[in-house]
Each structure stands twice: as structure tokens, then as C-alpha cells.
Image (tube, helix red, strand yellow):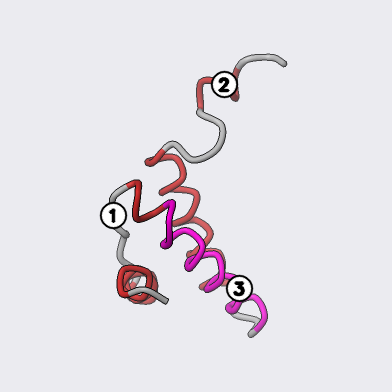
Amino acid sequence: MTEAAHNAIDLIRKGELIECSAEAYLSEIRDAIIRYASDCANSNDAIRMRIALAEVSRLDNKHGYGASAESADKPI
């Protein structure tokens, strides 16, 4: 795990928001947070898992990962 990913996980454990560049988030931090959420689920720590996944969702929206909010409102 890179130092940036390790620092991001530490921030989640402290209950703080992660501030990072889109490049760092998409290249390493996002995957590390999802692995952390999976580890929390495996150890029956649903609260930390949900916090981690909420942070992934927040950062996905912030850095434009996946479908945008505009396209979600448009019919297919």
C-alpha cells in the first residue's frame, strides 16, 4: 500500500474527510478504501465499512468517477 493510500485509510479511521487529487484517488486511493471496506465487512464491522463506502461515494462524485449526476437524470 502506498503512503497516500495508507494516509487515506488513517483519515477514515479518525472520521475525517479525505482530500486528494483526482489522479491519486483514481490510481491508488479508491482501491485501497474499497479493500479496507471489504476487510471491515469480513470482520463484521459494518459501521466502518459503511463509513468507508460513503467516503468512496463522496470522492467518486467529487472526482467525476462513473456516471455523472446529469446523466443519471436523463432517460436511456
The residue at which mark 3 appears reads as 46
Count residues near mark 1 (Cα–Cα under 10 Å), then give few for <14, some for 14-19, many for 20+: some
Q: Could you give the CA–CA distance between mark 3 and mark 2, rounded to whole angstroms?
A: 31 Å
The residue at which mark 2 appears reads as 71
Q: Amino acid at mark 2?
A: Ser
Q: Could you give the CA–CA distance between mark 3 and mark 1, rounded to whole angstroms?
A: 25 Å
> What label sits on residue 20 in the rendered view?
1
52 and 31: which one is in front?
Answer: 31
Name the residue rendered at 62%, 72% in the picture. Answer: 38
**21 lies above or below 69:** below
The C terminus is located in which quarter?
top right
Q: Nearer the viewer, mark 3 or mark 2?
A: 2
Q: Nearer the viewer, mark 3 or mark 1?
A: 1
Tag 3 secondary structure = helix
Q: How many marks?
A: 3
Q: Amino acid at mark 3?
A: Ala
Tag 2 secondary structure = helix
Q: Could you give the CA–CA distance between mark 2 and mark 1, rounded to whole angstroms?
A: 25 Å
Q: Percent from the top left, x then y, of residue 50?
A: 55, 64
> What label sits on residue 64 in the rendered view?
none
